[in-house]
Amino acid sequence: MKENLADNHSFFYICALISPCIKHPSMKSLALHIPLRWKSYLLLNIAGLALIYFLPALSHLLSFPLYLIEPMRLMVVLALVHTNRPNAWFLAATLPVFSFLVSGHPFFLKSLLIAIELLSFVWFFSIFSKLRWNTFASMLTAILTSKLIYYGLKALLISLLLIRTELVSTPWLIQAAVTLAFSLYALMFFRNSAGRQI
């Protein structure tokens, strides 16, 4: 309960700090000149960072471990579907680092593994999309391939005694359901138009 209150206090403190800046005329002028596309990218990135920062408090509030829905991959999937590949690269590389810096969780080597997994996911999805695969198949195969890389590297680190943790912490059934949900979402909303950088 104390941690939850602390997170809420920090949230309102941050809002109090940035609100004068947002109201400043120069900031309003700058906001008017930012293309709408970049505003949506910025909004998604801020939402991703906020989600990772407040994940423990939200999990406590909802009485549900939100890490089970793979929030970092969720933000990367949203970036691929609604923004572009460079922004997805950015989130894949920075979200695990940001999580480690602000909360110390996951621990460093696991954060590195997650970053590798997310980056490989973006790379595989880009490759499969360029091969004109069906969007559902591209997303599904990219997620499964990146998971194989993650668990392969994790098993190696465990065997070398560099990390002490169980190989699979999230039940396979939940992983399968989340993977299917992400793939269906991409099928419904992703558009591989000529103007998109996939």
Image (cartoon, helix red, strand yellow):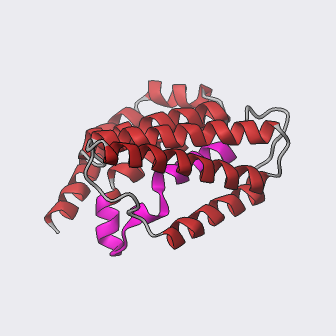
Position in image of residue 98 (x %, y %): 35, 39
Compare residues 184 and 162 and report the one nearer the observer: 162
- Asked if 159 appears above or below 166 in the picture, the reply is above
Apparent side of residue 148 relative to residue 151 in the rendered image (left or right) = right
- Asked if 33 appears above or below 23 in the picture, the reply is above
What predominant SS class does the magenta segment belong to? helix
Compare residues 5 and 167 and report the one nearer the observer: 167
Position in image of residue 6 (x %, y %): 18, 57
Quick one: which residue is furthest to the bottom in this view? Answer: 63
Residue at point 78%, 52% (across, down): 135
* Quarter of the rendering containing residue 88: top right
Residue at point 43%, 35% (across, down): 94
- Asked if 70 appears above or below 17 in the picture, the reply is below
Q: Give the quarter of the figure containing the N terminus.
A: bottom left
Residue at point 14%, 64% (across, down): 2
* Quarter of the rendering containing residue 181: bottom right
Whether 46 is among the magenta residues is no
Residue at point 61%, 26% (across, down): 33
Whether 64 is among the magenta residues is yes
Q: Can the viewer see residue 49 in this picture?
A: no
Position in image of residue 152 (x %, y %): 47, 47
Compare residues 6 and 158 and report the one nearer the observer: 158
Provide the residue span drawn in magenta: 56-83
For the image, the number of numbered tags is 0
Apparent side of residue 141 relative to residue 30 in the rendered image (left or right) = right
Position in image of residue 150 (x %, y %): 48, 46
Quick one: which residue is furthest to the left in this view? Answer: 2
Q: Can the viewer see residue 94 in this picture?
A: yes
* Quarter of the rendering containing residue 198: top right
Compare residues 146 and 15 and report the one nearer the observer: 146
